[in-house]
Image (cartoon, rainbow, N blue to C red):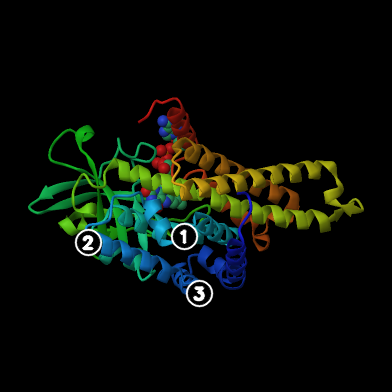
């Protein structure tokens, strides 16, 4: 259970080569916002046949839906089926991308995993055909839009975006912020409250699919960020955006409500340990090399016990995170649900990821602070893992409440 199988090792080697030869040289330009990650995503999908594989999964589901055979399933289940029911393979790919560019991995994961996944899980055949298929084949790029300027951790309670029923459709108003791929996406999965004039607390949440260019729908400029600079982020705005039934995910207000948002968040959280794994593994391996070769006081710094203690600490954290990824893959494959584990392990992996990246810089001394050594980027990117998909404290509090039986 705790070892990669041969096919995983093969993919790991191939993706690593691609990341080092193709992706890495583009990272500086992407970090500066001079280049976007999307053409590279397309290139990667083509190189590894990922778009074609996921595309055939979507087509199968469309056929089943049209024949009335598909049942409601969660997003991870649907996407996993499309990817040959091998979650470890997906985690290995996320890990390899995150060794070089966690931002690239995030933009990819949001488009292919969150946005396409949400549509795959709850969409009608027409919605899968029109929106999910072009996302998984990378013809289009997706965003997943929950957070608002006044609604972060309290995403539901404080949500202000509203969809007012209007004839056969809806009129959407409001805004979202911190949206990954926001400036450039083509398809946006957007959560809003249905406003029939009832008090806000009683307004149900429903899911809509928006397309770039719809009248009244606009995108803000890319934010300047501490990390994940190779993943564009922005606000998006809705001003009387007219939506038809085709834009209501699942075709009814009830088909993709709060439960669907929570499923999507659970899927996002279960992928974060794999990102942490990549960052930690790269930082650890590079640090091992550095402390073996860097000499001070006449010997390699790795011979000083103070350094060895830090190496041991990094090693334990690497192995813990690795084990968590193996367990998460096993749970996903075997459809074992344990929301507390997903929440707590996301929080743990994110925290130790930041610790390890900072320790790596420390053990590289001044060199670690230089862009050329790459780990300062990994440390900046690592911090986002503690914020995205719920902050560490919110993830831990949610896990505790789940363990205490205080939530449904
Ligand atoms: C680069 C980036 C990309 C992102 N991408 C997306 C995206 O694609 N889609 C999307 O929808 N969102 C996205 N987010 C938003 C992210 O999910 C939110 O930032 C996160 O949920 C936290 O919300 P907030 O920033 O409003 O912080 P707040 O909710 O304001 O929290 C601020 C602090 O208060 C603490 N806090 C709040 N409530 C409690 C409580 N009850 N108990 C204890 N502590 C509490 C938090 O832990 C945190 O430390 C992204 C964010 C960033 C930075």
Q: What x and y, as percent, mark residue 361? A: 69, 51
Residue 67 bears which disc, if any? 2
| SS state under label 2 | loop
In the image, what residue occupies the spot 44% across and 33% down? 398
Residue 152 bears which disc, if any? none
Judge whether residue 222 can be spotted in this image: no
Q: Does residue 214 appear left or right of residue 381 in this picture? A: left
Of badges 3 and 1, nearer the viewer stands 3
Badge 3: how crowded within 10 Å, few (<14), some, or many (20+)? few
In the image, what residue occupies the spot 20% across and 37% down? 203
Q: Mark 3 points at which residue?
A: 47
| SS state under label 1 | loop
Asked if the residues shown at circle 3 and circle 1 are in contact, with their CB atoms under 8 angstroms apart, the answer is: no
In terms of sequence position, does the residue under pointer 3 or pointer 2 come before the other?
3
Mark 1 near ligand 1 (CB under 8 Å)? yes
In the image, what residue occupies the spot 56% across and 48% down? 325
Badge 2: how crowded within 10 Å, few (<14), some, or many (20+)? few
Q: What x and y, as percent, mark residue 136? A: 38, 65
In terms of sequence position, does the residue under pointer 3 or pointer 1 come before the other?
3
Asked if the residues shown at circle 1 and circle 2 are in contact, with their CB atoms under 8 angstroms apart, the answer is: no
Q: Nearer the viewer, residue 130 or 393?
A: 130
Report ligand 1 position as a quadrant. Answer: top left
| SS state under label 3 | helix
Q: Label 1 vs label 2: CA separation? A: 39 Å
């Amino acid at each position: 259970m705790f070892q990669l199988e041969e096919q995983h090792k093969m993919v790991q080697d191939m993706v690593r080569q691609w990341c080092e030869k193709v992706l890495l040289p583009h990272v500086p330009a992407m970090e500066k916002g001079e280049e976007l990650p999307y053409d590279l995503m397309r290139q990667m999908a083509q190189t590894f046949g990922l778009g074609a594989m996921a595309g055939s999964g979507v087509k199968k589901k469309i056929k089943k839906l049209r024949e009335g055979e598909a049942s409601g399933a969660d997003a991870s289940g649907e996407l996993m089926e499309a990817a040959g029911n091998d979650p470890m393979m997906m985690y290995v790919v996320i890990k390899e991308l995150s060794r070089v560019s966690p931002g690239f991995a995030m933009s990819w994961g949001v488009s292919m995993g969150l946005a396409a996944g949400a549509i795959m899980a709850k969409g009608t055949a027409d919605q899968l055909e029109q929106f999910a298929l072009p996302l998984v084949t990378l013809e289009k790029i997706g965003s997943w839009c929950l957070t608002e300027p006044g609604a972060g951790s309290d995403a539901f309670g404080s949500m202000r975006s509203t969809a007012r029923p209007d004839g056969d459709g809806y009129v959407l108003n409001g805004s979202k912020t911190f949206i990954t791929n926001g400036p450039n996406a083509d398809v946006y999965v957007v959560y809003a409250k249905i406003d029939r004039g009832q008090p806000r607390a009683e307004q149900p949440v429903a899911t809509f699919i928006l397309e770039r260019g719809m009248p009244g729908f606009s995108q803000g400029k890319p934010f300047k960020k501490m990390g994940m600079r190779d993943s564009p982020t922005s606000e998006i705005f809705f001003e009387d955006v007219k939506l038809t039934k085709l834009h209501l995910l699942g075709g009814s207000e009830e088909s993709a409500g709060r439960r669907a948002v929570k499923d999507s968040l659970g899927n996002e959280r279960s992928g974060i340990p794999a990102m942490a794994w990549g960052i930690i593994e790269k930082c650890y391996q590079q640090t091992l090399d550095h402390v073996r070769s860097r000499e001070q006081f006449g010997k390699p710094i790795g011979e000083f016990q103070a350094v060895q203690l830090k190496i041991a600490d990094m090693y334990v954290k690497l192995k813990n995170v690795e084990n968590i990824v193996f367990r998460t893959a096993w749970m996903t494959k075997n459809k074992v649900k344990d929301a507390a584990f997903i929440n707590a392990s996301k929080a743990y992996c994110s925290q130790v990821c930041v610790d390890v990246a900072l320790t790596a810089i420390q053990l590289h001394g001044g060199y670690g602070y230089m862009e050329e050594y790459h780990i300062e980027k990994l440390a900046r990117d690592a911090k986002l893992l503690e914020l995205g998909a719920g902050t560490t404290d919110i993830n831990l509090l949610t896990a505790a409440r789940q363990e205490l039986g205080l939530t449904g």
